[in-house]
Image: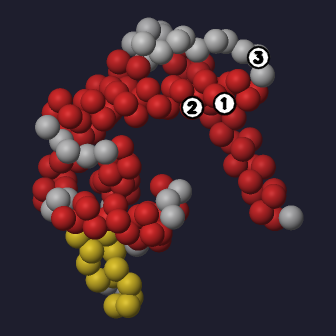
Amino acid sequence: MQAAATPTETPFGLCRLIGQIRAEIVFGIEQALIEEGVELNFSQFLALKRLGEDGPMAPGELARVLNYNPGALTRLLDKLEQLGYLQRVPDPNDRRSLRLELTASGRAVHTRMIACGNAASERAFAKISRNERVQLHGLLVRVLNHLRDEHERLAGS
């Protein structure tokens, strides 16, 4: 049994808490996938989720949105292709490029895995009210927007 997180007022302590929450949510989603008989790890889940939501895209686009290095992404894509969940198809606008798209099996597993993710998320937030969720969402969006503004500022320097 793990020790309970200790509250702290330091920004780094909040970062640590957010990291711990993320790890628990990842664990919950992976457990829900196992219970549903869907053999995916969280990285594979995220790749299929993005392709299912955003549609076909180039491998480089997927690497950017997942914040993945291209070599690691290639191995992940190879595994998903082996499982029959995605295929690499020629880009209709550029014959030299490939696009990633879900197969029929990929779309079917996408539906099942999203249900697993939703159930795990509901369990994660079961102890806070709708109003608290809205408040938490607003605070986290403010933090995210600030970080993105800082990244843009630094990139422009």
Residue nearer the viewer, 42 or 130:
42
Helix, strand or loop under label 3: loop
Q: Position of residue 75 (x, y in %)?
A: 35, 65
**Category of crowding for the residue at label 3, using alpha-carbon neighbours closer than 10 angstroms: few (below 14), some (14–19), many (at least 20):** few
Please name the residue shown 33% across and 74% down the image: 99
Q: Is residue 2 above or below residue 147?
A: above
Q: Circle 1 — which element? A: helix
Residue at the spot of label 1: 15
Whether residue 130 is visible, yes or no, is: no
Query: Which numbered tag is attached to residue 110?
Result: none
Q: CA distance from mark 3 to mark 1?
A: 11 Å
Query: 24 or 138, which is in the foreground?
Result: 24
| Mark number, residue 19 | 2
Residue at image point 54% right, 20% down: 134
Q: Earlier in the sequence, mark 3 or mark 2?
A: 3
Residue extending farthest to the bottom is: 95
Q: Horizontally, is 52 left or right of 105 in the view?
A: right
